[in-house]
Image (cartoon, rainbow, N blue to C red):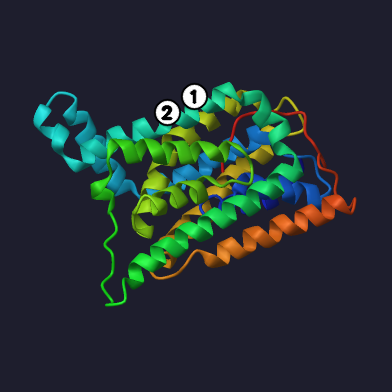
Amino acid sequence: MSWFESFILGLVQGLTEFLPISSSAHLRLTAAFAGWHDPGAAFTAVTQIGTEAAVIIFFRKDIGRIISAWCRSLVDRGMRRDHDAQLGWLVIVGSIPIGVLGLLFKDQIEGPFRDLRLIATTLIVLGLILGAADRLAARDARGDRGGHARPRKTIEQLSVKDGLLYGCAQALALVPGVSRSGATISGGLFMGYTREAAARYSFLLAIPAVMASGFLELTEIGEGHVSWGPTIFATVLAFVVAYAVIAWFMQYISTRSFMPFVIYRVLLGIALFVLVAAGVLSPHEGAAPGGGVSSG
């Protein structure tokens, strides 16, 4: 991998990780369209350490409060009713599905799941699901004929059941094209949470799974065409770009719909199908020998 490739891929990773359009799919497609080797799931997983570092810094006050409350709840029973302590446990519970499924389907994630036809399918299907969830949230905001809006749940109302369902939705992102944020936000909207609550928990839930995946895949870097220098460079760049994207996205969703992302996903998926059918791209274009488990 050249330094120019790492620059472009790091930029793409930072721009797409927290938008509901799938960072792993965009890394795969960027390489395919440019005629480069597939950077592989290991490269994706390691560069996601940079984007998750951006989450940790952006939500540092929330995270510090949650960790403090959770640690105190281990020795103080009274603290177990504290919302922040409960949220710490819910992040742990919600991280279980993606950890278990990531290990069970590691071989498929490294190979068959990176087929461009599957990515096109997941882009379209999850785009339509996100669209349906967004319309449901918009309908609740508009309210009934009398103009009475239907209240939606906040993150303070998160339950163990909902936390586990969020985790199951996040696990779908093991397939490139699904989008971890898109799947978890869609799940949250279907469960009746506000856009802000769904996005905030989605970002917090990603930290354990993505950081663990990235550190586990560090040993894979350097074994194939992806070397350490470009990977570190891409990771740092992804961190910087992702921080700016998080700040913008949290403001955007407070007043705007997800429909632009839905339209983009569907059009990209259709275009990808057309290019593969026309022979412009092979379903396994630029397939890389490297492996690893990533989500996004």
Instruction: Work out which residue is located at the far right of the displayed protein and give it.
Output: 279
Secondary structure under tag 2 reads helix
Viewer-closest of 143 and 269: 143
Q: How far apart are the two marked residues, 2 and 1, measured between alpha carbons?
A: 6 Å
**Residue sitting at x 40%, y 54%:** 189
Viewer-closest of 147 and 255: 147
Give the percent coordinates (x, y) of residue 222: 70, 27
Secondary structure under tag 1 reads helix
Q: Amino acid at mark 2?
A: Ile
Disc sitting over residue 100 in the figure = 1
Instruction: State left or right for residue 16 relative to residue 185.
Output: right
Give the percent coordinates (x, y) of residue 10: 63, 48
Quadrant for the C terminus in the image: top right
Which residue in the structure is indicated by mark 2?
96
Instruction: Work out which residue is located at the far front of the displayed protein and give it.
Output: 145
Q: In the image, is residue 172 above or below residue 256? A: above
Viewer-closest of 185 and 137: 137
Q: In the image, is residue 150 above or below residue 6? A: below
User: Pointer 1: residues within 10 angstroms few (<14), some, or many (20+)?
Assistant: few
**Residue sitting at x 31%, y 72%:** 144
